[in-house]
Amino acid sequence: MGIRRTILIASLALSGCTSGSEGIEPIRGSITYGGQPPARLSKSPPGSVLPHQFIDPTGRWVEETYIIQPDRSLKLVRRRDVVDSAD
């Protein structure tokens, strides 16, 4: 039950961010770069938060956050640079 509560809290927190982040475009390395992925996430409930880390075209580590929509598509709601704490 703790996981559901965490997902709900994260979803609510991110839902407040969606109005200001409508303009986030996928970049090379994004899950949705070139369109939605062919396989839909059928086991994850709508509203689930999906993090994704990768190296962007400039060589920086990036973390993106997606929310699974009711039609099982992914909506990119946040992108941030990952800072290496070892430096």
Image (cartoon, rainbow, N blue to C red):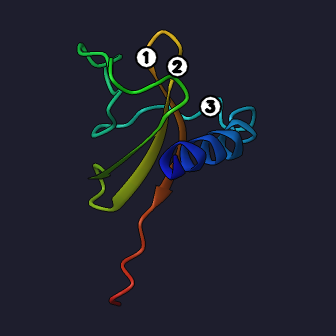
**Helix, strand or loop at mark 2:** loop
Q: Residue at x 33, y 17 (%)?
A: 42
Instruction: State the mark number for residue 19.
Output: none
Q: Residue at x 37, y 37 (%)?
A: 27
User: Residue lying farthest top?
Assistant: 71
Q: Which class describes the residues within 10 Å of circle 3: few (<14), some (14-19), or many (20+)?
A: few
- Sequence order check, earlier mark of 3 and 2: 3
Do the CB atoms of the residues marked 2 and 1 lie less than 8 Å apart?
yes
The quarter of the picture where the C terminus appears is bottom left
Q: Residue at x 51, y 22 (%)?
A: 46
Q: CA distance from mark 3 to mark 2?
A: 17 Å
In this rendering, the answer to whether 58 lies above or below 21 is: below
In this rendering, the answer to whether 14 lies above or below 71 is: below
Instruction: State the mark number for residue 23.
Output: 3
Where residue 11 sits in the image (x, y, percent)?
62, 39
Q: CA distance from mark 2 to mark 1?
A: 5 Å
In this rendering, the answer to whether 71 lies above or below 10 is: above
Place residue 7 in its image quadrant.
top right
- In the picture of the structure, the residue carrying the numbered disc 1 is 73
Q: Which class describes the residues within 10 Å of circle 2: few (<14), some (14-19), or many (20+)?
A: some
Q: Nearer the viewer, mark 3 or mark 2?
A: 2
Q: Residue at x 52, y 52 (%)?
A: 2
Do the CB atoms of the residues marked 3 and 1 lie less than 8 Å apart?
no
- In the picture of the structure, the residue carrying the numbered disc 2 is 69
Place residue 78 in its image quadrant.
top right
Q: Which class describes the residues within 10 Å of circle 1: few (<14), some (14-19), or many (20+)?
A: many
Mark 2: which amino acid? Answer: Gln
Where residue 21 sits in the image (x, y, percent)?
66, 37
Mark 3: which amino acid? Answer: Gly
Place residue 18 in its image quadrant.
top right
User: Residue lying farthest front?
Assistant: 1
Mark 1: which amino acid? Answer: Ser
